[in-house]
Image (tube, rainbow, N blue to C red):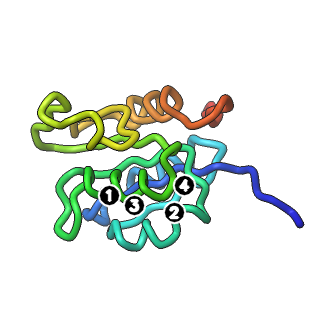
Amino acid sequence: METNDVQSIVIVDDEKSFTDMIGNLLQEHFTVPVYTFTRPEDALKKITALRPGIIVTDYYMPEMNGLEFIRAVHAMAPEIPSMIITGHSFNLDEHSPDGLGNLKEVLPKPFRWQQLAAAICRHWHGDNPPSIRVS
């Protein structure tokens, strides 16, 4: 039986244009697959099969906020690190540590893709963060 050891980047944000843009940028510059979702529920159904090295999610989404999504992922796969991206104020100190799942960082919008790329590498699950292609 063949196993797939390639981990991926999973992006979840309800704004499709933003998700498409950031997904394309990351796919262009990283050497691992990038999967994007506009609905957290859809991402949860596929999360274990995608083998994320990290999950990047928006905080404010209509059906499930980013922290709820991270908690759901944590219940399924507690080793997967997560990041929240948000255009709103989000203070980690206002949340109990045990309710944060494996949340590693909050990155405020707007940000440059290089900032996101650096954070992805910094918090990647495992010893081999993805390589960034040099243009």
- The disc, 1 or 4, on the residue closer to the chain's N-terminal end is 4
Q: Are marks 1 and 3 in contact (CB under 8 Å)?
A: no
Q: Position of residue 42 (x, y in %)?
A: 41, 73
Secondary structure found at label 2? helix
- Picture disc at residue 34: 4
Residue 93 locus on image (x, y percent): 16, 28
Q: Position of residue 118 (x, y in %)?
A: 46, 28
In this picture, residue 33 sits left or right of residue 41 = right
| Residue 82 seen in the current view | yes
Residue labelled with disc 1? 69
Of 99 and 7, which appears nearest the observer?
Answer: 99
Q: Residue at x 61, y 55 (%)?
A: 51
Q: Which residue is mark 2?
A: 47
Mark 3 — residue? Answer: 20
Label 1 sits on what residue type?
A: Phe
The disc, 3 or 2, on the residue closer to the chain's N-terminal end is: 3
State whether residue 37 is above or below residue 111.
below
